[in-house]
Image (cartoon, helix red, strand yellow):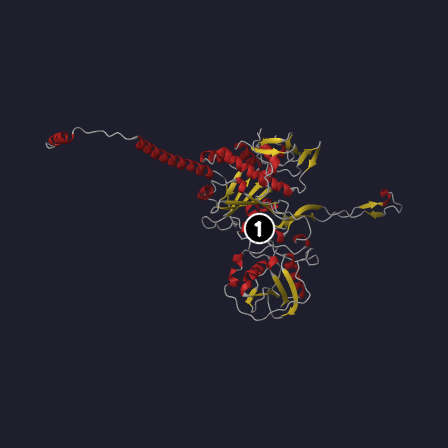
Amino acid sequence: MEPKWVAPLLALLLVEHGPPVLLRRTWPQRLLMLGNLAVIAACLIAAWSLQRVSETARSIPRIDFAAGQNTLAEPPAAGEPLNFLLVGSDSAARLDENNPVTAGRDLESEAKRSRADTIMLVRLDPETGRAAILSIPRDLWVPIPGFKEEKINAALSRGGPSLLVETVTSYFDVDIHHYMQVDFAGFAAVVDTIGGVPIYFQNPARDRSSGLSIPEAGCVSLTGSEALGYVRSRKYQEFIDGQWVSVDSRTDLDRGARQRDFMILALDQVVSRTGRNPLEIERLVSAVTDDGSSISIDDELSIRDLLNIGTAFREFDPDSLARYELPVKFDSVETGAAPAPRQQDTAESGETGEAGDTAEVAEPEIPRIEILRLMPQTAQPVLDVFRGLAPGDVHPADIKIIVAQGSGEPQQVADAVDSLRARGFDVVNSGQVEADSETVIRFTNDSQASAELLARYLGSLPGVGLKSGESASIELVVGADYNTVRLLPRPPAEISELFVSVPDVSTTLPAVPGETGETSETGDAGAPETTVSTTTLPPSPATTDGPSEVLSTTTTSEVVRGQVPSGTACE
């Protein structure tokens, strides 16, 4: 029951103000409310779609790098550049049996262990939104930790992703933060899911080995199976002037260039098909991870990392991807010992002589395989991009070194001189002897950066000392503790403590008149063999930058091969 005072109060209000009035909202107010509702709905949809994407990402199989020795580098601070190692394995185990790639392959064996068919290093800088990609030829001859020197693609079958990461890290002096691997089936699934990748062919093209067959020139939207034959082609031919012509003379290197360009065209297609829409991206990720094994990533890459990278690169233009290739040269190596010479009976061979006499057949040649060798001096500017070093940083060619003999043997001095020259340093042998000195680097305050780079190249960490004067040259005294010069420098962090407190020294070595410090064109052909660790290579003509086919780096200024001309229709 209402209190007695309520009715009189209502009557008074009606007398004073009349009946209540329902206010009508204006059109601007209604539009504002609709706008607010739209914003709220958009936020909810975005949150839901991101959740869907993250849930899908969680279904991607993980590679356990934490088990045993974790060869991935420590993750950098938020927003700092990241290096990814992208690997395409040569496993065809999950392809359709009618796919031409499966012909003559042991699919059961490949399902258990495979080699790396494609190796790419990708650097992403979230702060600047820039990305760079480097192809590592699978035929590159490198030391594999714990094993002998082999082609780099063997590291995956020898010890899995962890050993491949360790091989790349130790040989190139580049940190790897994350790892991603895809097999043939996963690659084909990605291409099919985005509706194929348009490629423009100037002429009909084929590769009977990879299964590529493009009968007519023009734009063709490659299916997953066709794209696989295209990027794997090592015997690429085009039909020109009535005949089939091999147009890729560098085999593995041209193949790498084609793969880098294909990645740009595929990214263009992803952007075109998804419009950067999280729902479409979620559909793409779902389609290629349904079988649970075609694509895998390292267990250190979190969902938050993936979302942060996606956010930082949401406006990334694929055409701005900086593309690089390693400077290498062709070589060959023996595959093992030759078989023993076969003995023939002279009567059987048609020769005259006593029965049972034998004639020795010429020794068979030791089989050889073709490989690629890195040209370390020329490679430094390319590798510096993925080390995060500025183009103006000091390089071996900028540094003059005066070498003297300490407690080491003359042969150690000769090895140091030849090996440092092979790495690109300007080296002079002073002929001076300081019999009691261990290996030490002397430098002035103005040349510390040069001294630090030299220390990074030495196999054993040297002593250091500050010398007087204004000479920019570095002095290196070779002691008994000297063992080798590394093919590539060790990480800067490993020598930083050497230069925290440097003692003053007064000894200065004179340069020998008439002795030049020019880098040898042919390398140190006479250098003796040196026993080295798996992270270094002995100085040899094959690892120096002598006259050979130097392959220039490729950047964004190059036209993307296969890019469809504007206005051209694609079937």
Q: Is residue 1 visible?
A: no
Mark 1 is on which residue type? Leu
In the rendering, at what x and y percent does residue 107 appear?
61, 36
In the rendering, at what x and y percent does residue 45 appear?
39, 34
Q: Nearer the viewer, residue 485 or 392?
A: 392
What secondary structure is marked by label 1?
Answer: helix
Q: Quadrant of residue 487?
A: bottom right
Q: Nearer the viewer, residue 293 or 176?
A: 176
Q: Is residue 204 above or below residue 507?
A: above
In the rendered view, does 124 fall on the left or right side of 154?
Answer: left
Q: Quadrant of residue 482?
A: bottom right
Question: Callout 1: few (<14), some (14-19), or many (20+) C-alpha neighbours within 10 Å?
Answer: some
Q: Which residue is mark 1?
A: 383
In the rendering, at what x and y percent does residue 527 appear?
69, 59
Residue at point 63% right, 36% down? Answer: 106
In the rendered view, does 530 fall on the left or right side of 388?
Answer: right
**Figure quadrant of the C terminus:** top right
Q: Is residue 203 above or below residue 158?
A: above
Q: Is residue 16 above or below residue 416?
A: above
Q: Is residue 130 visible?
A: yes
**Figure quadrant of the N terminus:** top left
In the rendering, at what x and y percent does residue 49 appear?
42, 35
